[in-house]
Amino acid sequence: MTSPKDRVVIFDTTLRDGEQSPGATMTHDEKLEIASMLDEMGVDIIEAGFPIASDGDFAAVSEIAKNAESATICGLARANFKDIDRCWDAVKHAKSPRIHTFIGTSPLHRAIPNLNKDEMADRIHDTVTHARNLCDNVQWSPMDATRTEWDYLARVVEIAIKAGATTINIPDTVGYTAPVESADLIRRLIAEVPGAEDVIFATHCHNDLGMATANSLAAVEGGARQIECTINGLGERAGNTALEEVVMALKVRGDIMPYTTGVETTKLMAISRRVAAVSGFPVQFNKAIVGKNAFAHESGIHQDGMLKNAETFEIMRPEDVGLSETSLVMGKHSGRAALRSKLKELGYDLADNQLADVFVRFKALADRKKEIYDDDLIALMQDEERTGEDRIKVDRVRVVCGTDGPQEAEITLTIDGEAHSSEATGDGPVDAAFNAVKALVPHKARLQLYQVSAVTEGTDAQATVTVRMEEEGRIVSGQSADTDTVVSSVRAYVNALNRLLVRREKAGKDAREISYKDAG
Ligand code: KIV
Ligand code: ZN
């Protein structure tokens, strides 16, 4: 029997720390959808956003709080009353709300608000007390804890506990710690700080040295009972601890780590794909648990062993993480009912009018591609969702390419309901096509990333293209899939431009000028 002490609370911060990653901005509806998937898969706490950052963040956190069925909904607040009040106004709608307030305690972070140790200690006492007067469930974090002097860290943790914090989170903000140190720090805090036995200790690791998962699991060995993590390890720089990695590590190695989580692991693959799609951050092929190659056995020796006994090279079954054998689904003779039922199996429950639209696109794809797999349908659905309310739509793309340059492109776009065409040349067909788009939609954005990957195998495979662009500090991503790589590239580019237009519009009324890194 597992005692309650052996239960590790999973705190997901995909929608806060993950979304903070430059370019990973999600729309309101996307945030709601991810939150509902997290809730359904048994994540204990969802950090839904940073309510003071913008009206958009506030609205998303409030609505997620209203909709949540079983997860606790948490919002982030810096160490000041205004942030904390705004956070409470957003999370208070939840059946189980939490306020998470923090301040940078290391010497480098103390210098930013220019507070000395005593002044910061007073600020911690006052803000945690204020949060606790609003909400019974208060988490406090000393940002950059792993680079904070031990004496000062112990002192401020004690102050936060006395002021009413119920969870103490120990962030490794810059991914600096190592497993032995991570375990020791939590162990020592629990052993030496008065009142530690009355709170839960949490671990929040970043992956700058590739040790976030190991550091989080070590912290659990040291006594932490909450792991903070994100889907696909999404997050600034090298990202945060990946939820799927810690959850599966605890499940597969229960023999040496006897802790349980409430996460339904068969839902991991679906949420990983969804987060990759809406954030515009594709999952690397060899990523543990959810990468395309995580369960692929290419070499002859491995294949032979797998056929005889899957356990020879597999420590977990693909179905444990929700990966079903990629099946050949349909071709151009498949009907509407078959498409509806296949999409339902993949998690898309469509109304009749939506199905009618998707069916047209499915038929067009089936005309160009003989065999349509699950992944093709997922890519098609993601494209469908992306283009819904876009101001710019791609009508026609035609390129001339080959060994003799310059390559040429002709493009027709519908912009706010009106068709516009242009022609351009470039260094290759994609460059020519992008130049033609730019002639119709002038912008100063700089292309930061252009990435192509095949959805399935074969020369008729769809290509998923991801584009990331930056304009005046605003970073946006776009994605699309098509059997024609140039068409897919233009659609991804236009998808990113549509997001840029939304961000430009919002910037006037709702600039995200506030950074969570400003302590006060
Ligand atoms: O990494 C960090 O320190 C954070 C805090 C706000 C908890 O994300
Ligand atoms: Zn963080």
Image (cartoon, rainbow, N blue to C red):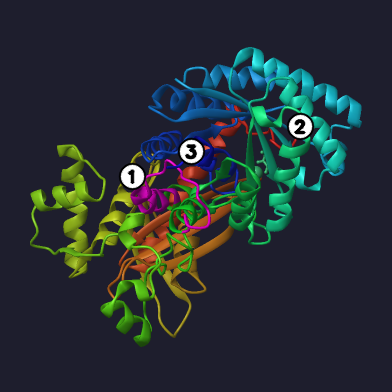
Image quadrant where one finds the C terminus: top right
Q: Which residue occupies 45% across, 37% down?
A: 31
Relative placement, left or right, of 286 versus 456 is: right
Q: Residue 516 in magenta?
A: no
Q: Nearer the viewer, residue 317 or 116?
A: 317
Q: Secondary structure at mark 2?
A: helix
Q: Residue 268 in magenta?
A: yes
Relative placement, left or right, of 472 versus 105 is: left
| Relative to 396, residue 495 above or below | above
Relative placement, left or right, of 379 versus 29 is: left
Where does residue 63 sit, x and y in percent of width and height? 44, 24
- Does label 1 point to a residue whose CB lies under 8 Å from ligand 2? no
Q: Which residue is mark 3?
A: 3
- First-in-chain label (1 vs 3): 3
| Relative to 108, residue 429 above or below | below
Which dot marks residue 385?
1
| Magenta stretch bounds | 253-275
Where does residue 295 sit, x and y in percent of width and height? 37, 68
